[in-house]
Image (tube, rainbow, N blue to C red):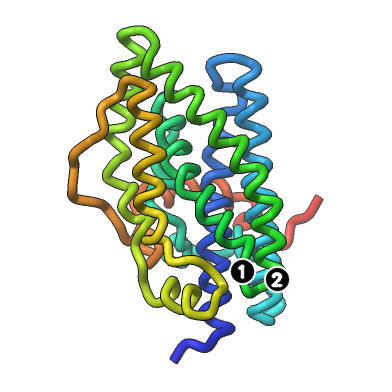
Amino acid sequence: MSTDKDNLFSYLIRLGDNSLIFGQQLGAWVGKGPELEEEMAMANFALDYIGQARMFYSLAANIEGQNRSEDDLAFLRDGMDFQNILLAEQPNGDFAITIARQFFFESFYQFQLAALKESSEPRLAEIAVKAEKEIRYHLRHARQWLVRLGDGTEESHQRMQSAVDELWRYTGELFEVDGIDEWASSTGVGPDPSLFRDQWSGYVSDALREATLSQPGQEWMASGGRQGKHSEHLGYLLAEMQFLQRAYPGAAW
């Protein structure tokens, strides 16, 4: 039977994994962005996410008490041990895909972090206070690009609509509730994500209308990431991200 300690560790790992994978994805845009200013923005957003991952992992390692560090949790776990949502690991694709991916997640993450500021775990609440300020800025940026591309040229509109249609199937997982979520909600550690569905839907629908984009009517949703069931994309991402630590165990600058 899972203890409160085990459940808190798992809850923090989920938060850390999401942040780490999104950070790795955005960092890959450096040198490939559509304009220099955008590369700088992506680099800064990536650093924000990596910073959040470090805080979540450090707290998780402290809770676990097995002498593992934040680096161990990031670089020395296999794909099946990661509990990030599937949306996070979807490839960057063209710029429209990246914007749609970030917009869908950060639209949800803003509500999650706002609730986590009231967490019964004081250290988690402190992390949420800092992270919410960062994500609020990220989301404003993503929404501006969503509208700019969606309500832009014929080609930019088509690409943005295709990105929305492609990634919509991964948004349902944001609101799934399992035993870890039920425990977090019952103890006040974290919110029930299903409670944000209406707020998220309203926010997203409003943004899509502003961008002259159609909201997909797809009902089937992909899931399994939080249970360690991932797409092949995570394997490629981890192979690149974890190479140095795997090849040279204990390497440090």
| Residue 77 coordinates in the image, percent (x, y) | 54, 65
| Residue 47 coordinates in the image, percent (x, y) | 68, 41
Question: Label 1: few (<14), some or many (≥20) within 10 Å?
Answer: many
Verify CB contact (< 8 Å) between mark 1 and mark 2. yes
Say left or right for 253 vs 212: right
State the residue position of label 2. Answer: 122
- Assign a secondary structure to mark 1: loop
For this orientation, the residue located farthest to the bottom is 1
Q: Amino acid at mark 1?
A: Ser
Say left or right for 50 vs 210: right
Q: Which mark is residue 151?
A: none
Residue at horizontal 60%, vertical 30%? 42
Residue 101 in the image: above or below residue 18: above
State the residue position of label 1. Answer: 119
Quarter of the figure that contains the N terminus: bottom left
Say left or right for 190 vs 204: right
Say left or right for 196 vs 219: right
Residue at horizontal 74%, vertical 56%? 251
Residue at horizontal 60%, vertical 21%? 38
